[in-house]
């Protein structure tokens, strides 16, 4: 079985700024795949999926070029303007074996119903028509719009990033837990076991994360859950080694077949990856 990190980032500040790191000093430098590679080797990660960080058109072609030249990267979740009238044509221009999904930084949109706007819905339909997954990067307050969206597009594969960023630091489960269950009721949605350490206190322990991981695993089932490190953002609270150790601890009660889903096979299926040797 392949072991896949389904969510990490790279960026080069010489190419473009990362404004979202303005208040995050630890992330105010460039991060390249070579820096991540030793961690991948230590944990027998066979392949990764790199994910966009900024709403800039030039970033996705650059990530696609990187993936095409690097055997460790088997997929790119890129960005394009979903509200543009020519979104289908732009997706056709981006088409490449490495392009597996599209996302928008919905978490930064002040309108909690942004996803339900008519032009956004048309863009998501175009993503599905192009054979790509759509990554949902939302906050708990935006989950109702996400639920409406996935129900409206039953033929589109959706991936919920970071479990919708639950309030782990405050140890609050509701209404996040109920809304996640409602979202998971749609069979066309998977979720990433990713980004949770960033929502937790510094140096998180498994007891911080377990209620949230258990809820995601229960609601979606291991065949719709995939591990992602969210490196280098995870470095805000712990290193790569600790991030994957916590994910593995959260999955200790699963069978070997279920763990195989979480740590690789779900990503292969949901992102339609055909470049990983199984």
Image: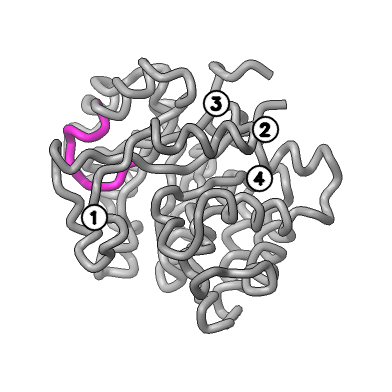
Q: Secondary structure at mark 4?
A: helix
Residue 263 appears in which quarter of the rendering?
top right
| Relative image position of residue 90 (x, y in whole percent) | 22, 27
**Residue 28 badge:** 1
Residue 51 appears in which quarter of the rendering?
top left
- Name the residue located 27 percent from the left edge and 69 percent from the top edge: 111
Q: Secondary structure at mark 3?
A: loop
Which badge, 2 or 1, comes first in the chain's sequence?
1
Q: Nearer the viewer, residue 124 or 118?
A: 124
**Residue 272 badge:** 3
| Mark 2 or 3, closer to the camera | 2
- Kindly identify which residue carries mark 2: 265
Q: Are marks 3 and 4 in contact (CB under 8 Å)?
A: no
- Kindly identify which residue carries mark 4: 224
| Relative image position of residue 151 (x, y in whole percent) | 52, 52
Which badge, 1 or 4, comes first in the chain's sequence?
1
């Amino acid at each position: 079985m392949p072991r896949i990190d389904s969510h990490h980032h790279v960026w080069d500040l010489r190419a473009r700024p990362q404004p979202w790191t303005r208040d995050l000093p630890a992330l105010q430098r460039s991060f390249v795949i070579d820096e991540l590679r030793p961690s991948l080797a230590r944990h027998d990660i066979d392949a990764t999926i790199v994910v966009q960080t900024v709403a800039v058109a030039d970033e996705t072609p650059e990530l696609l070029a990187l993936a095409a030249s690097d055997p460790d990267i088997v997929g790119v979740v890129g960005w394009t303007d979903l509200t543009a009238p020519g979104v289908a044509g732009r997706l056709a221009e981006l088409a490449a074996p490495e392009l597996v999904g599209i996302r928008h930084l919905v978490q930064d949109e002040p309108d909690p119903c942004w996803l339900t706007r008519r032009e956004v819905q048309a863009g998501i339909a175009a993503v599905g028509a192009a054979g790509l997954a759509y990554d949902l990067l939302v906050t708990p307050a935006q989950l109702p719009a996400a639920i409406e969206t996935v129900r409206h597009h039953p033929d589109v594969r959706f991936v919920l990033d970071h479990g919708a960023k639950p309030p782990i630091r405050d140890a609050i489960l509701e209404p996040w837990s109920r809304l996640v269950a409602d979202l998971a009721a749609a069979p066309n949605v998977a979720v990433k076991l990713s980004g949770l350490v960033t929502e937790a206190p510094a140096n998180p322990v498994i007891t911080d994360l377990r209620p949230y991981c258990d809820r995601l695993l229960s609601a979606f089932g291991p065949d719709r859950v995939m591990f992602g490190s969210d490196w280098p953002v995870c470095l805000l609270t712990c290193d790569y080694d600790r991030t994957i150790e916590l994910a593995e601890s959260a999955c200790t009660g699963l069978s070997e077949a279920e763990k195989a889903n979480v740590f690789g096979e779900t990503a292969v299926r949901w992102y339609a990856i055909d470049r990983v040797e199984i």
